[in-house]
Image (cartoon, rainbow, N blue to C red):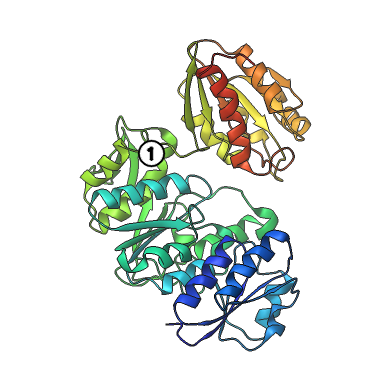
Amino acid sequence: MTDGADILVVGLGESGEAAALLAHAEGANVTVADTRETDGLRARARALDLLGIRTVLGCADPASLGRFDEAVISPGLPLGSPAIRGLAEAGLSVVPEFEFAARCFEGTILAITGSNGKSTMCQWCHDALVAAGRRTGLGGNFGPAASRVILADGHELDWLVLELSSFQLEAARAFRPRGAVLLNLLPNHLDRHGSMDGYRAAKARLFQAMEEGDVAAAPADLLDRLAIPGPVGRIATGPGGDAVWSGGSVRSRDGEVLADLSGTPLDNPVHGANAVGPAAVLRRLGVPAEALRRAAEAFQPLPHRLQPLGAWRGIRFVNDSKSTNAAALGAALAAMDAPVRLLAGGRAKPEDFSGLAPALRARAASIHLFGESQDLLAAAWAGTGVPVSRAPDLEAAFAQAVAAAGSGEIVLFSPGCVSYDQFQNFERRGDAFVSLTRRLTQEGRQP
């Protein structure tokens, strides 16, 4: 497909490096450009140079590097950035890394997007396909880049499950998954997409190239606004739709159980509601209900995503560091089954946190704030009647929450904000919470 083609890869992060290696393996002549020049990028560039892949760092205008058949771009580069605009103005076809990878794959692709819950649902679908005997890979926004999965195992796989973000999808041109799911759509990444309309339009590009025989699922109130091509099989999810979450199971409109998740780690209002679209699509594509059930029974919560960490003196601890916006925090509160001592804070995205007041009144026994957005969050939740305390950092907030908690309650770490004021990323932030918790649950050391 790319044999002999001249391919420009823009961006030398994880996805850019993977795309370059895949294009090279497919026989293309590859040039990689990055506007940045750091020690880490230099090391990565040297490794590619040894393979005969040309690299150019500190390049503000990749389009000036020569004539190319196609440009493959990384999700960290917005379409409106000068480097990408220059490619378009030069008349160069631009595709996102995951779409380039998909063209090199001959199996069946299931693609999942949404504002919250993507990673958990992708892992569950992957596990269900494996339980059904399908050789299946997993990657995209969660796990390795799609190109790396194809490079390593593409010829051995029957299925590929891709998690796709709006940053990846905004550049999609002709990506065609066999099954596609939009889990939900909540305010997020508006600084990049400009508005909810722009954000929805980016997500909708998941469906634009689907054809007859493909299956698409989305919330019932959004399905008609996604411009899904006419011949595609459509499944409306949620209240009033073709498939719903009810009584521990995903059920069709006529009551048929599509996936029994009762008593499994996915049996809660958040994961259950998110499971509706993926379960309905997989069943439509021939995956048996028993495989979905077996995968749910064996499912291990992903790190930093509503991850249970054990208990101390009857107090349970849950790590939801992946919560970086108000919607994710609201979902975490909805998933709790006991009074919550909430740890929240960090650097807030530009959104309205006052809408969480009803959920906080219903679930939270106290709120413990840390990080630079304490004043904003305290003001947004001042009318809830829930006691609010402040702390200079996560460790101090954790100590407050543990001191306030009693047996039968939950210390929930769901920041609702990004981590960059005090941590490099949400993983490092979550690891810090895990470390604090283990001092109690494993060593008995109180904060």
Q: Judge left or right: residue 331 versus residue 246.
A: right
* Three-letter code, disc 1: Gly
* Residue at 54% over, 72% down: 20
Residue 7 in picture, x, y percent from top left: 56, 81
In the image, residue 189 sits, relative to residue 228, either above or below, namely above
* Residue at 70% over, 55% down: 191
Q: The C terminus is located in which quarter?
A: top right
Residue nearest the viewer, comparing 362 with 413: 413
Residue 262 in picture, x, y percent from top left: 29, 32
Residue nearest the viewer, comparing 208 with 289: 289
Is residue 165 visible to the viewer in this orientation of the structure?
yes
In the image, residue 59 sits, relative to residue 250, either above or below, namely below
Name which quarter of the figure residue 192 lies in: bottom right
Dot 1 falls on a residue whose secondary structure is helix
Residue 289 in picture, x, y percent from top left: 22, 46
Q: Which residue is mark 1?
A: 272
Residue nearest the viewer, comparing 159 with 181: 159
Residue 188 in picture, x, y percent from top left: 62, 49
